[in-house]
Image (cartoon, rainbow, N blue to C red):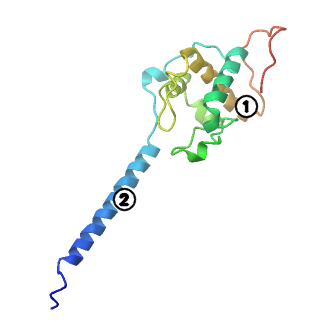
Amino acid sequence: MNPDKNPEAPKRKLLLGVSVVFVIVAVAGSIILYATRDWNAPAAARNLQNPVPPTDDSITAGMMSYSTHCQSCHGERGDGKGERAEKLSIAPSDFTDAHAMGQMTDGELFWKISHGRHPMPSFQNKLTEQERWELVDYIRTLSQKAASGAAPATNAPVPQTDAAPKRQ
């Protein structure tokens, strides 16, 4: 037997290898669980009613907030393919998915905008309550446009003659 060889060395290598594999699996599992967990609003938030009717004015105001705060990740069309989307750890929601958007209440959408979830920031202290509800009104139009291929009808009052033209 060679005195230079340590009989414990293979056991230590095996233990180190098992430890490294365990850490890798634990980290990967944590990432997968975080990325796939549901983002559910509380029941009270889901039951909130939008106090801002979807008029041309509220939708236009929501569109302005969207272009400033949401478009870079969610995309110009709301399809989740904004210029920053690929850099995010979780893909942005696709607001053009009529089925998915139809399952989400206005209150739930308002809550998600208000509270955020990494990587999406919270807008509770960045936008007023009115602005967040207007954003809900505008986001709703994105799935309607995708489904019909045209701009949605709103419950707007009869337009005034001096009103600014609508942006599409």
Using the image, determine if residue 61 lies above or below residue 13.
Answer: above
Q: Which mark is residue 24?
A: 2
x, y percent for residue 104:
55, 29
Extreme residue toward the front, this view? 4
Residue lying furthest right: 161
**Which secondary structure, mark 2?**
helix
Q: Which residue is mark 1?
A: 145
Q: Quadrant of the C terminus?
A: top right
Q: Residue at x 62, y 19 (%)?
A: 134
User: Which element is circle 1 on?
Assistant: helix
Q: Locate residue 2 relative to residue 52 in the image: left or right.
A: left
User: Dot 2: within a 10 Å radius of its alpha carbon, few (fewer than 14), some, or many (20 or more) residues?
Assistant: few
Viewed as shown, does residue 81 lie left or right of 25?
A: right
Q: Type of residue at label 2? A: Ile
Towards the viewer: 152 or 70: 70
**Residue drawn at the location 56% of the way across and 31% of the way down:** 103
User: Where residue 43 sits: x, y (%)?
Assistant: 43, 24
The mark that comes first in sequence, 1 or 2, is 2
Q: Quadrant of residue 138?
A: top right
Res 70 quadrant in image: top right
Q: Amino acid at mark 1?
A: Lys
- For label 1, the crowd category at 10 Å Cα-Cα, with few meaning under 14, some 14 to 19 and many 20 or more, is some
Q: Residue at x 18, y 85 (%)?
A: 4
> As drawn, is 145 to the left or to the right of 53?
right
Q: CA distance from mark 1 to mark 2?
A: 44 Å
Residue 73 rendering spot, x and y as whole percentages: 61, 38
